[in-house]
Amino acid sequence: MNARYRRSLLRQAIFTSIICIAAAISLVPWQVYADEPASSESQASNVTISFVDQDGSTFTSYTAHVGDALEIPQHPERAGYVFTGWKPAPPAQVSQSARFTATWAPVGLTEINGSYRYVDASGTPQGGWQMIDGSWYLFDSKGWALSGWQQVRGWWYLCDNTGKLATGLTQDPKGYWYYFNVPGGWMESGWKMIDGSWHYFTPGGWAVSGWQSVNGWWYLCDNTGKVSTGLTQDPKGYWYCFNSPGGWMETGWQMIDGAWYYFTSGGWAVPGWHQVNGWWYLCDDTGKLTTGHAKSPAGYWYYFNVPGGWMETGWKDVDGSPRYFASDGHRLSGMQKIDGSMYSFDDAGVPRLGLHSTPKGKVYGLERGRLATGLTKTPEGKTYYFNTQGIMQTGYIRTGGKLYLFNASGELDTVEDESHDITRGIDVSQFNGSIDWNKVKRESDVSWAFVRAGGRYGGPGTLFEDRMFTKNMQGSAAAHIPVGVYFFSQAITEAEAREEADYVCRKLGSYTHVALPVAIDVEITPGCRQNLVGKDRLTQVIKAFCDRVASWGYKPMIYMNTNEATNRIYYNELSSYEFWIAQYGPLNTFKHPYRIWQFTSDARVPGVDGRVDMNYYYHKLLP
């Protein structure tokens, strides 16, 4: 007990003694505890002695005689406190009525006027380290709690206002997060595993949020120092993948929750298309690879490997239906050419089967939507004809040595053996060179020929004779091949047309094998003189040529291709003349009657070097 404390007790004892003496001398009434005023000598010798607690409750009370020895009871027990004596101090003998109050001192950690103090079981304040209820506390030498940051033997501690040391993850009064050893309480730094997650604390002990580079690895921490793991979006909105549970940033391919993700060398996910090792991938905002049948941001459909995610091409089964994905990956729809064959798909890429309409015409879808071509008999028992593009055709079709007629619905109407009514012939000019007509007659099925007599140049429009005209006429006559003659016209007036007709017919007088018509060859090409005249004028020019030929006693004919014969003339005004129609392929779509069909310019005939035009002559007008 220090000197100041002893002097305080001495002053308190002196003061108490003075009060007691004054009370005895003045005989203050409250000091007497007799139930009734003393009325006799015997009564005056009886006094009341009481021992009470601080709250006024009585421990014991009894009547005694002055001069008796004072009986002091056993002090009571009070939880959390230690008994420190009676006030006033009991005398040895009873001298008067008296009341004695028990005094206590708190034990353990106690709040005193807003501050905390620690007292041991003997009532003595204790300083330094104290273990209270399993936690460490720190007190000064007088037992008062230390609060805030405290440095002890080089280690830092954080105490609350009771002196209790912070442990584990703790936020200090300034809002910074720290980690304190459990249960020791000293501040720690570096990597710490807290509740199954890694946290990082700087050498100064505090947690730093955001991106941190530690030993060459990048980490993303929250304000408690906890490192992000798995798929995480940083404060700027970019997505990253962090190792679980290590927390370091990962790059490249990562498997997250059963799905593949791709992250750049910088760690962030970039949405959209990526080419990796020659393969294309499509990622969402988080870097997750698209798999299966999916639509790109641009609105095109693709197919991505499951679960690999790379873009696939070719045929793929999607929802039970085959779909086709082109070499650039997008799903095909509409009419498409695949490996040399035409296919038909709906807008969802599903193959269209059976007879159906398309913008180009009717088609018939077979397996996987492959379009039928040529002569086709359907499972429904109907026969159609489809061109090489798969489009249904109507009218007359020559194929396989037979002539087929398909009605307006495309269904087969009649079939004729064309060998009875059709003969084959060629048309030639100086561009075919020297022809061995005897070989043509002997080694081919050519029954007749048309020989070009000449033509009209563009520009001034002078007439010219075909350089091989005479030789071809003589050769065909010697081989007994009947011929017709044609003239390459560029007449733009009726007078010029008659001039051309006269020019041709004058040359035919000496030839007796001209059994076929004399034709006007109308071919309207860029730069052609006739390209400058209108539909009405061209019709009148052709009519003038034909009428002039007829006046010479020859049968006139008009040579044009299907398009020009349909759109550049008024057919009804020329319908009394026979037509020679050029349209290459197996189908002639000219809607009006025609006598001859030039169906190819690529025929090969013995006796003719190179390619030559081949024609069919229909002895019964078609269509």
Image (tube, helix red, strand yellow):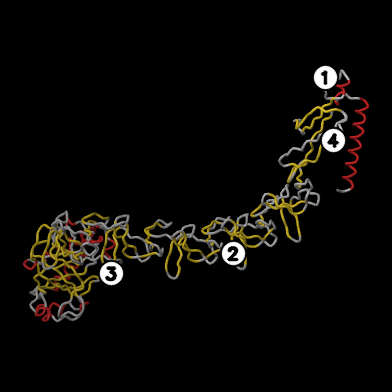
Q: Residues within 10 Å of mark 1 (few under 14, many from 20)?
A: few
Secondary element under disc 1, as helix, strand or loop, is loop
User: Disc 4 marks which amino acid?
Assistant: Pro
Give whichever of 118, 253 is nearer the camera: 118
Q: Which residue is mark 3?
A: 458
- Asked if the residues shown at circle 2 and circle 3 are in contact, with their CB atoms under 8 angstroms apart, the answer is no
Q: Amino acid at mark 2?
A: Trp
Looking at the image, residue 329 lies above or below residue 348: below
Q: Callout 4: helix, strand or loop?
A: loop
Describe residue 225's horizontal placement relative to residue 386 as left or right: right
Q: How far, Cα to Cα, is label 4 from label 1?
A: 24 Å
Secondary structure beneath dot 3 equals loop
> Type of residue at label 1?
Glu
The reply to whether residue 494 is visible in this rendering is no
The numbered disc on residue 36 is 1
Tag 2 residue = 218
User: Alpha carbon of mark 4 to alpha carbon of mark 2: how far?
Assistant: 77 Å
Q: Can you say which quadrant of the picture contains the C terminus? A: bottom left
Q: Is residue 265 left or right of residue 534?
A: right
In the displayed structure, does residue 496 sit left or right of residue 39?
left
